[in-house]
Image (spheres, grey):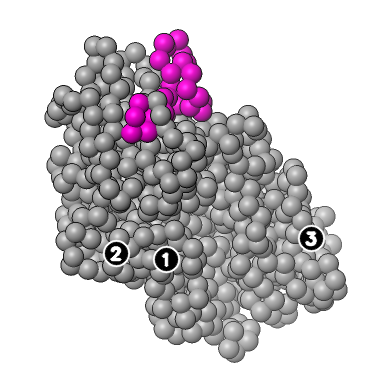
Amino acid sequence: MPVSQGSYRVRSGRRYPPGATVEDDGVNFSVFSRHATGAELLLYEGADSEAPFQVIRLDPRINRTFFSWHLLVVDLPPGTHYTWRMEGPNDPHIHGWRFDERIELVDPWARGVNVSAWDRWRRQREGVIDHDSPRGIVLAEEYNWEGDTPLRLASEQTIIYEVHVGGFTRHPNSGVRHPGTFLGLIEKIPYLKELGITHVELMPVMAFDEQDVPEAGWDAGLRNFWGYSTFGFFSPHPGYCVTPEQGTHRREFRDMVKALHRAGIGVILDVVFNHTSEGGGEGPALTFKGFGNETFYCLDGIDKGIYLDFTGCGNTVNANHPMVTHFILDALEYWVRAMHVDGFRFDLASAMARDADGRPMANPPVLWEIELSDTLAASKIIAEAWDAAGLYQVGSFPGYRWMEWNGRYRDTIRRFVRGDTGLVPEVATRLSGSSDLYQANLRKPTNSINFVTCHDGFTLWDLVSFNRKHNLANCEGNRDGTNDNLSWNCGVEGETKDAEVLRLRRRQAKNLLSLLFLSQGIPMLLAGDEVLRTQQGNNNVWCQDNALGWFDWSLVETNASMLRFVRGLIALRKRHPSLQRRHFLSGQPVSGSDLPDVIWHGEKIGEPNWDDPGNQVLAFTLGPATPDEAMLHVMVNMSPGARCFEIPATDGLRWCLALDTARAAPTDLMEPADQTPVESNALLIRSHSLVVLEGR
């Protein structure tokens, strides 16, 4: 490896902490690489510098301790960009070693990463190219948090809004100064606050490879839009920063967090520790492959050149190796301690429950370390409790604090609302907090993240407008994305001018969201569903960094009545503690009340018809959780015809119409001051509709 002289003196440095750390007399660099035999540190003036200004070769006698390579560069200024090159054996099939002294690597612990010097597909076509790699940045800026701390909100009061930072403001009609960035999201905080959500769940914001798409897709202008291709686990994504070349990653991210906290909104990060952007054997070496491929990835027991793939992305992180577990905990605690985030949602988290050979573990160390971390004790931790190889752990994810995306909830509610029969008992269980999944393990309704849509799949409007996926724009022959959408197009596939079909679709959208916000557990709303955003039937826009994947802000006016309805739904949930219980609905009096927490009905009071396989109706009455709370009575008719429901008779109580999904705005949802009393002892509920009464 060539060596050049630079102007900065070098000392031995120390192995802890890993990464680039600014100290009084310079910058200490340290990386983990157990089997490397040599190392070089390359220093660049900036992200676009064509060549390093100094290349420093490390002496293993002085600059190596245990499995760490380290040095201190005296008086090196913050803002310097850097990469590593590692020497060592290249024996992928026997030992899994993939050292290549030609390839520049980005520090896994880099606090900031820039990618302007990286061309994935040029390397794929031409081989290793000098100085073609993402680069780390030495960061040392001070930050004034102005008293900010992570929020502390009871889980039962949480309402999550899943949002893509780039797509939320990148549309030309977003009206923000810095579209597609952390700062752009700040400008939309008034919208979020008025909507009423309590937390944003940001799709991946750690540095990811936007070029990680099939070559044909790249040539067609597609990009890795969603960001599930991480390589910089300590760095905010430079593509979401206004001036990343100046090393402003942390400041811009922190400004966003601080502004959201001032508005009372928490920040949950969608994190990807199940795989990385390096892919399988043919994928590029960016970081882990070049420092310790055999440590960081699950490899085949016979041919270690083969990557075990439980993620569908070419590799699986060896999360339960002690070093990798430490790395993951270090990253999570950093984002809480230094960046003030309020929690994490773990993509394909069941892959993290596997050992190095891919076998599921009863007590995976990494998951228990996350559960028991003091630094993460107040953070919300959410699992997507399955992986791409069939390990489905909804209801049985290891640990007590772990919340789970409840896929059973999603599927049951979708089927029920589209008109499937025989589901009423399970629907009642889902509305009650899914006790069948959580109660036996001493867990609570708040362990269930309830949702009917998320980034992965149809949007709400597409769920009621398409029976089939339409993913041809992804350049994969419509093979990608799930075929099992549990959707109903209401009689016409896709766009239509049929007024009756459009009315039914809106009613169905309201039904789905009404059940979501009337359920025990934690509701999650997909950004854009409140204004009926469409992806034109594409249920997998992971590569569509364009209008197909962006939030169209014109819909705020076009579908203002739906936005008003969703805001009202959230407000209704917030004013009813009976919808935010920490225990499963049991039908028994609680908290000193004489009234049961729930009474189930059908069309007749007290007769829910659990055993009728053709039943498509359900009603229930919720007892108040506090003395001043109004009672709730809910009637749901998913049958093709109108049905007459009896209304409970209660002494001294008047029922008022709060919500009727069959009505047009503004009488589809009314605030308490505008509600009208129901004078009869029965109501006719239209087909595919839902009615809520409040009793005072």
Taking 664 as reference, is 552 above or below it? below
The reply to whether the C-beta atoms of the residues labelled 2 and 1 are less than 8 Å apart is no
Residue 539: which disc?
A: 1
Query: Is 261 on the left-hand or right-hand side of 247?
Result: left
Earlier in the chain: of badge 3 and badge 2, it is: 3
From the viewer's perspective, is the residue at label 1 or at label 3 nearer?
Answer: 1
Which residue is pictured at 23% across the width and 29% down the height?
682
Q: Residues within 10 Å of mark 2 (few under 14, many from 20)?
A: some
Q: Is residue 164 found inside the magenta-colored segment of the image?
A: no
Q: For mark 3, give the secondary structure.
A: loop
State the SS at label 2: loop
The residue beneath circle 2 is 491
| Mark nearer the N terminus (1 vs 3) | 3
- What kind of residue is marked 2? Gly
How far across and how far down the image is residue 625, in percent? 39, 19
Please state the horizontal and vertical placement of residue 127, each as a whole percent of the image.
Answer: 63, 86
Give the alpha-carbon distance from disc 3 to disc 2, as whole Å: 48 Å
Q: What segment is highlighted magenta in the picture?
A: 576-605
Image quadrant of residue 464? bottom left
Q: Quadrant of residue 282?
A: bottom right
Q: CA distance from mark 2 to mark 1?
A: 19 Å
Disc number for residue 357: 3
Q: Name the image quarter holding the N terminus.
A: bottom right
**Callout count:** 3
